[in-house]
Structure formats: C-alpha cells, structure tokens
Image (cartoon, rainbow, N blue to C red):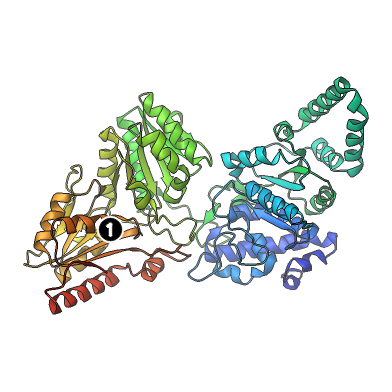
Amino acid sequence: MAELLDSIHDTADVRRLEKKQLPQLCAEVRHCLIDTVSKTAGHLASGLGVVELTVALHYVFDTPHDKIIWDVGHQAYPHKILTGHRQELATIRQHHGLHAFIWRGETPYDVLSTGHASTSIGSALGLALAARAQGIKEHVVAVIGDGSLTGGMAFEALNHAGTFKDLNLLVILNDNEMSISENVGSLAQSLAEVLANPHYVKLVEGGKRVLTKLPALRDFALRAQEHVKGMVMPGTLFEELGFNYIGPVDGNDVVRLSSLLEKVKDLPGLQFLHVVTRKGKGYAPAERDPICYHGVPAFDPDAGVPQTPHPNDKSFSRAFGNWLCAAAKRDEKVVGITPAMRIGSAMDEFAKLFPDRFYDVAIAEQHALVLASGLAAGGMHPVVAIYSSFLQRAYDSVIHDVAIQDLPIVLAIDRAGVVGPDGPTHQGAFDIAYLRTVPNLTLLAPATRDELNLMLDFALALGHPCAVRYPRMNGWQSLTEIAGPKEEPLVLGKSQILYDPHKPQACAVIAVGAQAAELLPYAKEQGFILVNLRFIKPLDTALLATLAARCATIVTVEDGALLGGVGEEIGRILLEHGFKGRFKALGLPDVFLMEGTRAEVLADAGLTAKQICAQLTALELTNSMNKEEQYAVI
C-alpha cells in the first residue's frame, strides 16, 4: 500500500503532511525504491540510506524555489520519486527512459546535472552567489557524501566558500561510512540541537561583540569554544574552513531531523550539518553488504542479489582482475591503484590477496596517477585501474605526471567506449581522442579477453607509459571461439589481419577492440579483409600503406568519438600513401550518448556489426558505379 505516496505529486504535497506522517511516507518511498529497482536494475543502497534526509529536506525547504544540489546522483532516486517521477522510475537507465542521475532540466528541481562526485559544494556556492548578486531570497543546500567528500574538489569548494562570511549556504554531509564515520551518541545528538538553536547562536555572537575590545580574552573564549566542541564532535576541520559545524545527528530519524533542519534553515552564514545515515537502510541484505547493493542488476527482493562466482564472469573487467592477481604473483613490485572502484574494476580478489600492494585512493582520480608516478619513480610497477570517463578528471596528470616523465605506468582503462545504462556522464567516448595526442604514451585495445592478457603483459614490460582500453561487456575468450586465428604475439605498433579473402580490389574494415571480434563472422561471410587494429598508437603504417595500394574501399570502426578519433588519423595516412578509393570512418557521433544498453546505443550510432556491413556494401556499390571518383571521407 502507498496511501501517502499516492497523494504526493510534487514536494508541495510533502509539505502539506503533518510531521508525524513523515515516517510512514519514508516507509512507502523505501518500499517503492526496492520494488522498482529490483525490476529495472540500478543504484539501490545509497538511495535507501537517504530516504529520511530527502523527505526532511523537501518538507522543510520550499523546493523548487529553494535549491538542493545532490552530489553523486545515485543518491537521488528518492528525490526523483518525490518530485514527480515515481511512475517513470520504472524506466530509469533504460533507452529513452529516466536519466540515471540528476539531469539539468528534467524537472524544475534539477538545476544542474550530477553524474560524477565532489561537485555539489562548488555548484551550490555558485548558485548562492548568483542569488545574492541578483537579490533573490532563497536557500541553497548541498548534499555531499557516499564517498564524495574524499574528492579534492569538495575541499577546494569548502575552502573558497569560507571566504564569504556573510553568505547563506548549508552543506549537509551524508556520512554513511563511505566518507568519515562517527557514532551518533545521545550527547552528540543533543549538543547538535543546542548548536542549531538560534538563542545559542545569538549568545555566541553577542559574546563576540562584547569581547571585541578585549582581543586577548575574545581569542581565548573562541579557542575554548572550539576545543570543547572538538572533544565531542569531528567538526574542527570544517570550523577552521569557516563553517558553523552542527552534528553528528541521526539522518534516519525523519521527525527529529526535520525539526533540526527547521532550526538550521534560519541560521545565517555558512552552516555544515553532519548527518549519519545507514547505507541500504530498511533492506537487510543491503545493510549487511552496502557495496554489493550499491548498484544492482534486476533481482528478487526476497532472495537478494545472486552472488555470481568469478569463474563464470566473462567480462573484460574480470579478465583484468584475474590478470592483475597473476601478474602480482610473478612480480612482487606490481601494485594496484583504484579511485574507489575496487568492485567495479574487479580488483576485489587482488585486494584480498595483496592488501599491502593495493591502494584505493577514494574519489581522487588525479591523485591516483600522481601516486602512481611516485611509486614508479621509486622502482615499483603501478597498474592504475580507472574508468574511461573518470580518467578525464586526471588528464592533466596523464600529461604532467606520467607522459612527460616517461614513467612505466600501466593505465587499465575500464568502461571504454559505449557503457550503456549510466548515460552521458559515464560513456567512455573520448579516451581515444584525448590520449592519442599525448607523446610517450602507447595505446592499445583488445578484441578478446586473451588478447587483453597479452596487452597487459606487454604494457607491464614496456618500461614506458602504456594504456589498455577495454569495454564494459562480456567478451570472447579467444578468437578461436569464433573460428578465427590464434592471438599472435604483440609487436609494438603492429596490427593483426583476422581474415583476408585474397581478392583483387578488396574491401577492408579496420576495427578497434571488441568490434573486431564481433565483425569476424561477417568478414568471412561477405568476403572483406578484417584488420584488428590492436595498437591505436603507434599505428601500423606499413600495413596501411599496403591496404592503400591494394584496396578499393576502406572503412574504420571505433567505439569512440569520431571527431579526433583514430579513424581520422588513418584516413590522413592513407591519403599520404596515395589511396584513391572510397574511405569512411565510423565512430560515435558528436553528441552526448544517453541511456540504453550497449546494443541500443551502438544501434543508434549505426555501429552494430550488421549496420557496419550494410554501409560497407553501400560503399562498394558506389565505388563500382564510379571508378574515377577520388578519395573522400563520407
């Protein structure tokens, strides 16, 4: 039953409830979240933990006039439920469905998009300054947590905010043991309510004014106040940054939290409210294992998420994790680094086997590479496992701390290319374009899981910066599974011909990564040359020269951005070698790719194996009709 939730169409309806009804509303929101996500897949544990906080915020603040900025959008499923998307939640992360994270303009409540972490405080600060500059009276609240306080940008924003002593801004730390964790005791809870009391604030401010003419005594009193608060609360750091720290308080007690927020709402200046929540709250399996239930597939809520044994996992990610364990057994200098993606990057087994050689740096991607540079300079062999879209945040370090110094660091780039349901903030569309131009950096892409092992071995032995990009998908173990040749040993800058019909004026497809394996059956069926590029940088210029002299039509295929991609570079090299036939570069279009399965997103981009073959056929027909046509990029 959803007696209250059925009457909630926007947050104004939440504010019409009596405070004593809020616990029931929370229970209904939690049930709706479990019921929906168990059918659709998505993020679960984080949302379960902030149900009470979400209800309390919308109950106390006049949203959407007042602004709530959520850090890490996977916390915001309850927010979506209360802001008019309850029915649409069944389409979340699906093709043409509800956005996976907070999306600017999706509702009047969503003024900024949030997909990655540690941005809420800076965004909220900007909104508060904009409101002040325009004379707009509104409250701005940043909700950070679920690990995102570990990101350096959060502290940069806190430090900057502290320079605006007269600015009204509320930062709420959702502490669910993924950021900093302090037990919520009765003393701390009661003290937090005292600190939020306007009479206490007036007393403190009045005391400061009285003691203005006695600076020594005033400084002593302020230090005494800070030390007393510091003995029972972890807020000294935030006080030093210029915020009035309040907490920690129980973030899963909606009635008490609402009462506290009503007091905090009226306090002037910079406020920092520390609430402690339980990730996975209200669903026992998620409470026991919040990491497993952070992001879930569709599952039976009564049975829980099935625990798939690692041997049955055919993903490129698991192949990487297995390789890393094997490499560490062979080489005691191998160390693994991840920015908070131990499970996602399949480093869980490595972390168990080699805890002294595993470094989870939290949500601090740039630091991950800086740390790797120090380890490499110190004689270790660092392997940094990082998502393609997260590596964008560390691009400066790729150049300055890795490539310029020519350090032997392996970048294992997970989620490269089309990622799918997580949408535009997580698609790995740009890594080829932004890495291809960096000197000293070798870049590879495997067609199969066995080839991934070969490439990682090659990268580890290279002695220079090397990146291996691989997709979020189950892949073929080897080419022989699809009646292809065996994986050949790697030679720097050499591609592999997977199929050659040995026909005059042949057509050729040069494919990057897993798409080479996917195209192999079609190459044999339709009789075109299929090249597994292997090395995106450096390119196999000798093979390209041979193809330029031999082929009538050449097509490149990459699951990365077409603009700046490797296809453009191949086209340039072919032209330099006098290619006179038809050329077409296929890749991801110049748009941000929305949610959908990998197959759906590739189909939208015209990059399924069947669509690629159809375009190749059309080019062949065009070429046979006009033999005199010169080289053209279509």
In the rendered image, residue 493, in percent from the top left (x then y), is placed at: 20, 45
Q: Is residue 362 above or below residue 601?
A: above
Q: Quadrant of the N terminus?
A: bottom right
Q: Residue furthest top?
A: 216
Image-based side of 633 in relation to 274, left or right:
left
Q: Nearer the viewer, residue 349 or 272?
A: 272
In the rendered image, residue 486, in percent from the top left (x then y), is placed at: 17, 51
Q: Is residue 615 above or below residue 214?
A: below
Q: Residue at x 58, y 58 (%)?
A: 113
Image-based side of 76 in relation to 217, left or right:
left
Q: Residue at x 35, y 34 (%)?
A: 404
Q: Residue furthest bottom?
A: 625
Q: Nearer the viewer, residue 457 or 298?
A: 457
In the rendered image, residue 52, in percent from the top left (x then y), is placed at: 73, 55
Can you tell which quarter of the image residue 585 is in?
A: bottom left
Can you tell which quarter of the image residue 398 is in?
A: top left
Q: Is residue 175 above or below residue 328?
A: below
Q: Residue at x 56, y 48 (%)?
A: 117
Residue on which disc 1 sits: 568
**Tag 1: Cα neighbours inside 10 Å, few (<14), some, or many (≥20)?**
some
Q: Amino acid at mark 1?
A: Glu
